[in-house]
Amino acid sequence: MITVILLLSIWHTAAAACCPDGWMQYGGSCYTIITSQRDWTEASTDCGIYGAHLINIETKAENDFIKNYLKKFTKTGASLTSWIGLSDMIGSWQWTPQGESVSFTDWSPGQPGRDEPNSNCVTLWAPKGYTWDDYGCNLSANFICEKAIETTPLVG
Ligand SMILES: [Ca+2]
Ligand SMILES: [Ca+2]
């Protein structure tokens, strides 16, 4: 009897951990792409409204996941150059909001290249297969929010 209760408890816990509607799950995170055009700071603020932050891409696996997702839209003609949570506004590349230094990178050829003024913020750049480009923080792009999977407490 105790075993059955424990198993049910595990099953319920697993079922309760999920992403909100409109968010997709990968690993321990939920992600959504927002197609409103925002500058980097506005995008960061908007993710905060959802209890999220701009995506932090720590691994090749996470990078591949989000790139492949964006490329599906490209096949339909969409160009979804999107902000990620990486900037060097304070002099070195760091992930917002925790300030982790960058380890994995996937720069576009020739980037970071400072093509525009104030190129201190990073996009996944549609014309180059969503590799990374440093871009003017005050320019506009889509953006990707990430947050930890929510585990809904069991009721009853
Ligand atoms: Ca992440
Ligand atoms: Ca650049």
Image (cartoon, rainbow, N blue to C red):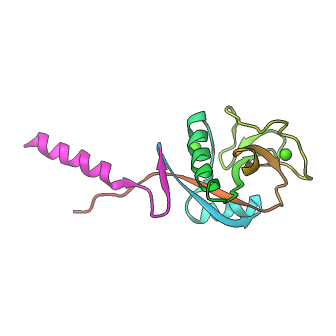
Is residue 88 highlighted in magenta? no
The residue at the far left in this view is 1
Is residue 2 highlighted in magenta? yes
Residue under the point 57% across and 50% down: 69
Picture coordinates of residue 48 (x, y %)? Answer: 61, 61
**Foreground pick, 81 / 18:** 81
Picture coordinates of residue 147 (x, y %)? Answer: 53, 53
Picture coordinates of residue 139 (x, y %)? Answer: 82, 61
**Above or below for 94 versus 75:** above
56 with respect to 136 (left or right): left
Residue under the point 66% across and 50% down: 97
**Foreground pick, 72 / 154:** 72
Say which quadrant the C terminus sits in: bottom left
Picture coordinates of residue 154 (x, y %)? Answer: 28, 58
Residue under the point 25% across and 45% down: 10
Q: Which residues are magenta?
A: 1-26
